[in-house]
Image (cartoon, rainbow, N blue to C red):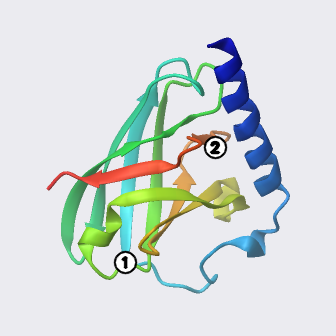
């Protein structure tokens, strides 16, 4: 069990290190792109970084609020057990395409106000620009990606 946890931690560290060296221009959407929706995300974890994680949020899309759940994201910071974030959604054409498995498209991209953004992209081409609302908070994405499911 210890070996499996260590292997997961090493793979996360390697992937985060690789993304950290990417320039800000590595963002998967143009700097002047207009989001088609916004989201808020709240969640938490037990044994931050390696334990059980949970999350839920609201997507504002086409003047409607859609609730969703998220699995596979936690906080890296030791001692941090809850997180909040906001985000912008790009390339969403149908609400059904929001649900899916997201992988990191870029991480650690600087945004206004000193915050950083993590870009996630799913199999439908939908991009989420996830912005940490707590300065210094870093997200840890599961090796298999982040799964988002619509509630309604």
Q: As drawn, is 35 to the left or to the right of 2?
A: left
Quadrant (top left, top right, bottom left, bottom right) of the C terminus:
bottom left
Q: Which mark is residue 135?
A: 2
Residue picked out by circle 1 = 92
Residue in the picture at 72% in, 22% down: 6
Q: As drawn, is 45 to the left or to the right of 103?
A: left
Relative to 81, is 125 above or below? Answer: below
N-terminal of the pair, mark 2 or mark 1, is 1
Mark in front: 2 vs 1? 1
Q: Position of residue 35 (x, y in %)?
A: 44, 78
Relative to 141, is 114 above or below? Answer: below
Q: Which mark is residue 14?
A: none
Residue in the picture at 57% in, 34% down: 75
Q: Quadrant of residue 38?
A: bottom left
Relative to 55, is 85 above or below? Answer: below
Q: Quadrant of residue 50?
A: top right
Tell me the SS state at disc 1.
loop
C-alpha gap between disc 2 and disc 1: 28 Å
Tell me the SS state at disc 2.
loop
Quadrant (top left, top right, bottom left, bottom right) of the N terminus:
top right
Observer-nearest residue: 152 or 116? 152
Residue in the picture at 45% in, 42% down: 84
Q: Residue furthest top?
A: 2
């Amino acid at each position: 069990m210890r070996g499996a946890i260590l292997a997961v931690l090493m793979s996360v560290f390697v992937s985060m290190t690789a993304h950290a060296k990417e320039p800000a221009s590595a963002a998967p959407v143009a700097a002047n792109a207009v989001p088609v929706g916004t989201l808020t995300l709240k969640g938490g974890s037990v044994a931050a970084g390696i334990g059980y994680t949970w999350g839920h949020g609201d997507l504002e899309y086409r003047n409607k609020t859609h609730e969703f759940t998220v699995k596979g994201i936690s906080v890296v910071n030791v001692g941090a057990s809850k997180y909040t974030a906001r985000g912008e959604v790009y390339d969403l054409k149908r609400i059904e395409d929001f649900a899916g498995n997201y992988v990191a498209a870029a991480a650690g991209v600087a945004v206004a106000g000193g915050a950083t953004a993590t870009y996630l992209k799913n199999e439908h081409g939908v991009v989420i620009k996830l912005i940490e609302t707590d300065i210094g908070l870093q997200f840890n994405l599961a090796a298999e990606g982040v799964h988002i499911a619509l509630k309604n």
